[in-house]
Amino acid sequence: MSIYLVGNTLPAEPAGERFAKLVRRGGILRLPGAHNGLAALQAKRHGFEALYLSGAAVSASMGLPDLGIITVEDVCFFIRQVSRASALPVLVDGDTGYGEALNVMHMVRAFEDAGAAAVHIEDQLLPKKCGHLNDKKLAAPEDMAAKIAAAARARRHLFIIARTDAAASEGLDGAVARAQRYLDAGADAIFPEALTTADMFREFARRVNAPLLANMTEFGRTPYFTAAEFEAMGYRLVIWPVSALRMAAKAQEQLYAAIRREDGPRSLIGQMQTRQELYETISYSEYEALDASIIKTILP
């Protein structure tokens, strides 16, 4: 039965607590990106226990670059889709917190209300950039620490991850120093962004005593590693933030090109998800059965 509309199937434990348990149990937590409710359902069908909602994927879904343009409410719209559809704990990209300390507190409450389990906040200044691009501008460590402290004060259950982009401009020593400051401010885990070698990943893990998140984005500065390899390097979480969106976007490009070229999509029908497959994924028949059962209960 579909999770979204049937109250007795909804998890009773807060999402943040469920997420924290997954992190604490050991091993590495695999978090594929899911940029909408359908993607979330597909990931769940393949056995993933938690999901990631990328700010870059949300921005791209809206036809915008990942430059801090989107708002808290924009992101909440996607959080509700992903968390309701899957009922899985969702880690959400909180960018820079959408402002200063009070704005961060508002973001934390809004994300929790929308269904988020965890958030990561980064130490860039606006206009922020993808962590794998150049010319990123960093906030002062004390200002970022204040945001983390504000997030920790505002949360009810949200798991808080502090992301540092300092390795590119301040080196590993700077990134480690910032990470320790953010942990002291109340972060539950650390996300060192855009490390470029296995040695850097291992050294950061050796020097920072906290759960660590690795970002395995394609076409970035980080070489390709598997989740098992990140685990061996000392990491507890790994995200593939935009992989699903990239696959979907490439397929859409091919579809539109075929329609334009061939005056229809006939040549690609074999590559499409069938109506039956779609209905199975979104629990179409279960929704129909639920509707019929409710109608029966109110008839004289």
Image (cartoon, grey):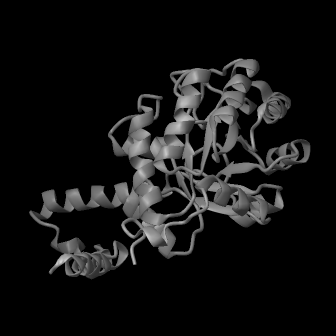
Quick check: 135 above or below 236?
above
| Horizontal and vertical percent position of residue 220 | 59, 44
Q: Quadrant of the C terminus?
A: bottom left
274 left or right of 53 in image: left
| Horizontal and vertical percent position of residue 3 | 43, 69
Seen at 88% across and 45% down, the residue is 209
194 left or right of 184 in image: left
Quick check: 240 above or below 93?
below
Q: Quadrant of the N terminus?
A: bottom left
158 left or right of 279 in image: right
In the image shown, does 245 or 256 lie closer to the viewer? 245
Of all residues shown, which one is farthest toward the right?
206
136 left or right of 228 in image: left
Q: Where, by quadrant of the figure, is residue 180 drawn? A: top right
Of all residues shown, which one is farthest toward the front?
300
Q: Where, by quadrant of the figure, is residue 163 drawn? A: top right
Q: Where, by quadrant of the figure, is residue 102 drawn? A: top right
Seen at 51% across and 56% down, the residue is 33
Seen at 68% across and 32% down, the residue is 153
- Looking at the image, can residue 96 be seen? no
| Horizontal and vertical percent position of residue 23 | 73, 59
In the image shown, does 148 or 195 lie closer to the viewer? 148
In the image shown, does 174 or 21 lie closer to the viewer? 21
| Horizontal and vertical percent position of residue 226 | 68, 63
